[in-house]
Image (cartoon, rainbow, N blue to C red):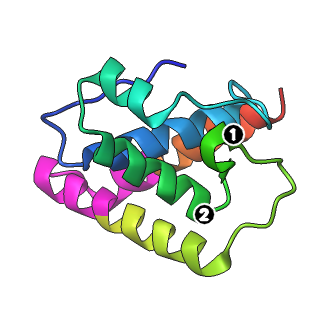
Amino acid sequence: MIVRIDPASAVPVYEQIRAQIVLMVASGTLAPGTQLPTIRQLASDLGLAKGTVSKAYEALVSEGAAVSNGRHGTVVAARNSAINPAAAEHRLRESALQLAVTAHQVGASKAEVRRWLNEAIGQIRGASTS
């Protein structure tokens, strides 16, 4: 599993990790039941504090994208696992705000933001049907 962190990004590091894992799951790169690296291992690989990776994994579990098996690690959740609606709404609102902040910082128009968002949704949908 390859995760890349951009320390210069306005997006918090834990969110970068969470978003990349969600993308890998949506695209089929990570299948349900796939064991995620341990918190310690991923933190070491990325040169991060364990707490940062732990926060990303907690978010994945909270939104239903992953399941924690305690000492046995964290795995990608089954596709039909129930997603906590409140957690899903929270993540969506948080992501929308981050997108709005980034768009404002780079001077993007609403039309440009819609175009990029539609393209990203198309990539996810296209990847999940292949």
Label 1: state its secondary structure: strand
* Residue reaching furthest to the bottom: 86
Q: Give the residue type at disc 2.
A: Glu
Does residue 116 sit above or below 5 in this rendering? below
Q: Which of the 4 image quadrants contains residue 103?
A: bottom left
Q: 10 Å neighbourhood of mark 1: few (<14), some, or many (≥20)? A: many
Q: Mark 2 points at which residue?
A: 63
Query: Magenta stretch?
Result: 98-116
User: Is 75 part of what is drawn in magenta?
Assistant: no
Q: Name the residue under label 1.
A: 75
Q: Which numbered disc, 2 or 1, marks the residue that appears first in the sequence?
A: 2
**Total numbered circles:** 2
Identify the residue at horizontal 49%, vertical 57% (top origin). Answer: 58
Alpha carbon distance from label 2 to label 1: 13 Å
Residue 55 x, y percent position in the rendering = 38, 54
Q: Give the residue type at disc 1.
A: Val
Residue 130 x, y percent position in the rendering = 83, 26
With 18 as the anchor, is 99 left or right in this view?
left
Q: Which of the 4 image quadrants contains residue 46?
A: top left
Query: In this rendering, which labeled residue sits more in front, label 2 or label 1?
Result: 1
Identify the residue at horizontal 17%, vertical 48% (top origin). Answer: 10
Residue 34 x, y percent position in the rendering = 73, 30
With 22 as the anchor, is 109 left or right in this view?
left
Helix, strand or loop for the magenta stretch, by majority:
helix
